[in-house]
Image (cartoon, coloured by chain):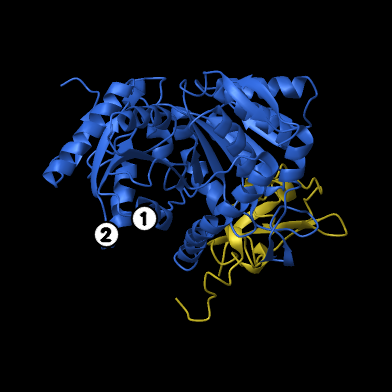
Amino acid sequence: MKGQILMGLNGDEASAYATKQVNPDVVAAYPITPQTIIVERFSEYVADGEVETEFVAVESEHSALSSCVAAAAAGARAFTATAANGLALMWEITYIASSLRLPIVMAVANRALSGPINIHNDHSDSMGARDSGWIQIYCENSQEVYDASIAAWRIGEHPDVQLPVMVCLDGFTLSHTMENVLTLPDEAVRTFVGERKFIRVRGQSGETELRLNPEAPLTFGPLDLQDYYFEHKMQQVDAMEQALVAIPEVDAEYAKVSGREYGFIHPYMMEDAEVAVMGLGSTMGTVRHVVDQLREEGVKAGLLKLRVFRPFPSKELVKMVGDLPILGVLDKSASFGAPGGPLYEEVKTAFYDEAERPLIAGYIHGLGGRDTSPDLIRGVFESLLGVYERGEVRDKVSYVGVRQ
Amino acid sequence: MSRQEPGWRELPRGAVSTKSTTEYETGDWGIEKPEIDRSKCTKCLLCHFYCPEGAIRVRDDGYTEVDLRHCKGCGICAEECPVKCIAMVRKK
């Protein structure tokens, strides 16, 4: 598309730059590695007068998200960013933001949760928040971070959705690694995101917009007991179902502006694949490299990159997998005591009722930033080829790259 | 749960209240209620400001008045009154 400028940006800078172009009303944030560059850059935009944003320097992540809840309830576009223990400290507010249906956008520079303390990448932080009612988008590179950081507003604010959105980028691997990023002109971004639109609700003083307004008062966050809480949770369940419809709409509109097409799942070399690996985030770049190598060696390898984890696109997944016989699922977080990693469990659930389904094996890798090398991915494919030959999965879940 | 309660499709999103809090009468929660002796009251209005329920109104004549439909009988007004003209008395 015309007018786009190629910039050298790391993942954090791509998030900050996109957010600058969106020009949200409020950014409330607290620094934490590897997210810090996002709010650091953004505070410079504020200081330099490049945005009209009110920047709230809070004393903790709990306050950061609380401020965003208040701002979003008042009708503002509110943004924050965090990682690992910062997200953990936000925990109770993540559920409040989604239940109050506040379309906040938050960048999560994925980092391993303490302890022992570790600053490097895995997905234990955002995977722990997978039931909090937020939409979750996982990015493979800085370009995807930039694009998701713009599209997220339209997805969250979609009238049928009205949910907060996490844009997840792998700590250091993306957050601190400079890449070429095609950026839209400011005007194109502002036109695309437009003004925040409000749904109408029936409140205590009649029908009004869902936001705090002294002219038409609303009570946000009331006590909600046995008689109403379940109904409000059903509305959140429904909102995620609606997001499965809304996300492709927003993606299609964004593709018209940017020329970059996104979906729930990005397949690669899947048409005739006999063995494929599925996963999230930057690891999938490494997997693509290995798929290319294996193809040169005559192995019919493929990959499925999941971009949207919440809502989980089960139908889309089943369709894309088709008659693939063997599927390996990469998880960059462990769920202690569970049958497997979070993605593995979702994938198996998606296929349980299907008459035609692949053999599925889970691989947990990269905890605490342990390097996931091409050799390691090659080992995963070799393991899957062994499953193919035997016709059965012996180890449902393997831990790869860990010293025995 | 009664059948006339609305289903999830009908309820406003965001869990906003459909009724004003003024319609929730909390006046029967407490065992005591404040009684104001206006002969000693200096109209300082501290009881009005301290009341956590907003249940103490200011009348046109400058004296305060307790809305017993909402007063929970916490006694903060009596505690804060600088001239001790508010007494907490047991409800009959």
Circle 2 chain: A
Task: Look at mark 2 in the image and give the residue it sits on.
Answer: A356
Q: Quadrant of residue A268?
A: top left
Task: Look at mark 1 in the image and give the residue it sits on.
Answer: A318
* Quadrant in the picture for the C terminus of chain A: top left
Q: Position of residue A323 (x, y in %)?
A: 30, 54
Q: Colour of chain A?
A: blue
**Residue A299 placement, left or right of B22:** left
Q: Colour of chain B?
A: yellow
Label 1: element kind = helix
Identity, as a three-letter code, of the amino acid under mark 1: Val
**Residue B14 placement, left or right of A275:** right
Comparing A280 with B52, the one in front is A280
Image mark for residue B63:
none
Comparing A31 with A20, the one in front is A20
Label 1 CA crowd tier, 10 Å (few <14, some 14–19, many 20+): some
* Quadrant in the picture for the N terminus of chain A: top right
Q: Position of residue A261 (x, y in %)?
A: 58, 43
Residue name at image x 50 percent, y 21 percent: A34
Comparing A386 with A150, the one in front is A386
The span from disc 1 to disc 2 (Cα, nearest Å) is: 9 Å
Of labels 1 and 2, earlier in sequence is 1
Residue that extends furthest to the right in the rendered view of this protein: B61
Labels in figure, total: 2
Comparing B5 with A234, the one in front is A234
